[in-house]
Image: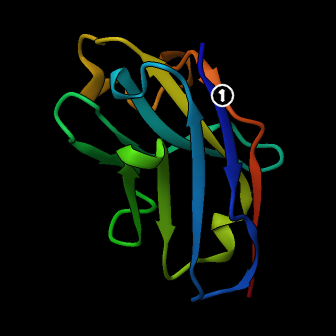
Amino acid sequence: QVQLVESGGGSVQAGGSLRLSCAVATSTYSNNYLGWFRQAPGKEREGVAAISPFTSNTYYGDSVKGRFSISQDNAKSTVYLQMNNLKPDDTALYYCAAAAGRIFGYAGRWNWPATYNYWGQGTQVTVSS
């Protein structure tokens, strides 16, 4: 069982920065792929970034490459999403997600919501122009 609690959302002007945190409560933290997704009203849930626990490879959606960065602090069982140069289009509810165990072909599936077993409640990010 994995419990995820996001924090760090808020309102910011375009060009600003926010750092989201996701506290991961589980006895098997090191065996979980961790991802960030977002969903804006009327849109599908979109994969933003993810990190593999086995390779430390990171993955990013095209719309956030070069602006967002995913990282983790294993000692704190926390994964972060640093978001820089925010744009109004980044406005959404941001979710942390976890997928337990080894996943064949994760690199091609990291941004599929169905890949993940566990989800947080989300934290709102609002970017004004």
Q: What residue type is labelled 1?
A: Trp
Q: How is the image coloured?
A: rainbow
Crowding near the residue tagged with mark 1, few <14, some 14–19, many ≥20 C-alpha atoms within 10 Å: many
- Disc 1 is placed on an element classified as strand
Rendered-image quadrant of the C terminus: bottom right
Q: Residue at x 38, y 30 (%)?
A: 110
Q: How many labels does the image show?
A: 1
Q: Residue at x 83, y 48 (%)?
A: 41
- Image coordinates of residue 100 in percent, x first then y, are 43, 15
Q: Foreground residue, 56 or 37?
A: 56
- The reply, left or right, for residue 101 in relation to residue 117 is left
Q: Residue at x 82, y 43 (%)?
A: 42
- The reply, left or right, for residue 104 in relation to residue 125 is left
Rendered-image quadrant of the N terminus: top right
Q: In this view, does 6 lie above or below 98?
A: below
- Image coordinates of residue 70 in percent, x first then y, are 39, 55
- Image coordinates of residue 118 in percent, x first then y, are 61, 21
- Image coordinates of residue 60 in percent, x first then y, are 36, 50
Which residue sits furthest left? 55
Q: In this view, does 80 lie above or below 118?
A: below
Q: Foreground residue, 38 or 43?
A: 38
Q: Is residue 70 above or below residue 37?
A: below
The part of the image, by quadrant, that contains residue 2 is: top right
- The reply, left or right, for residue 4 in relation to residue 26 is right
Q: In this view, does 71 lie above or below 34?
A: below
- The reply, left or right, for residue 43 in relation to residue 49 is right
Mark 1, residue position: 119
Q: Residue at x 30, y 12 (%)?
A: 103
